Image (cartoon, rainbow, N blue to C red):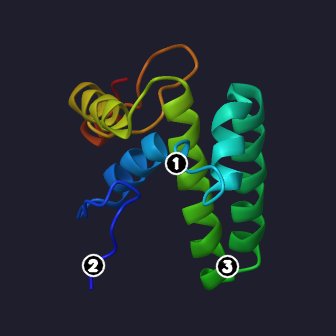
Amino acid sequence: MAATSVAGAAHSDPIRQLEEDLKHAADDPERFPRTTKLLSAGAPQQAKKMVEEAAELAIEAVQSDRAAALSEAADLVYNLVVLLEGLGLSFDDVRHELKRRRSVYGIAAKQQKNGVGSPRPSDSASGGG
């Protein structure tokens, strides 16, 4: 049986499902007290949770505990989606930014601090960039 959202509809994309569920969680604070509290706490608390989950993921990765790292990665993504929701952003906005970066830089990597993207492998091989 497929899992259903708080609103009752099932989605194949768990990120979109989570976004929908978050929109309805506040309607049922007794069922989702931690989520409701985090949503209402605002960006500072949401950002703090992001840092905590990222650190926990890093620790599990260093310890090579794949099962625990997977669980922490899911916690990190959950908290990222909560933070984005609080900022009025969606994961689709993140997807679009990643696509934009790939079209500009050839990979969806983080830009260098000076705003210049990573050189393409062909640029490095030819001595350019």
> Mark 3 sits on what residue?
68
As rendered, which of 101 and 3 lies closer to the eye?
3
Q: Check the image and report above or below for 27 versus 120.
A: below
> Mark 1 sits on what residue?
25
The residue under the point 69% across, 53% down is 33
Q: Secondary structure at mark 3?
A: helix
Report the amino acid beneath label 2: Ala
Q: Quadrant of the C terminus?
A: top left
Q: Check the image and report above or below for 60 versus 44.
A: below
The residue under the point 68% across, 71% down is 61
User: What's the CA distance linking mark 1 and mark 3?
Assistant: 26 Å
> Which of the marked residues, 1 or 3, is nearer the chain's N terminus?
1
Left or right of 10, for residue 88: right
Proximity of marks 3 and 2: CB atoms separated by less than 8 Å: no
Q: Quadrant of the N terminus?
A: bottom left
Q: Check the image and report above or below for 22 versus 88.
A: below
The residue under the point 77% across, 35% down is 45
Residue 83, image x and y in percent? Answer: 58, 35
As rendered, which of 64 and 43 lies closer to the eye?
43
> Mark 2 sits on what residue?
2
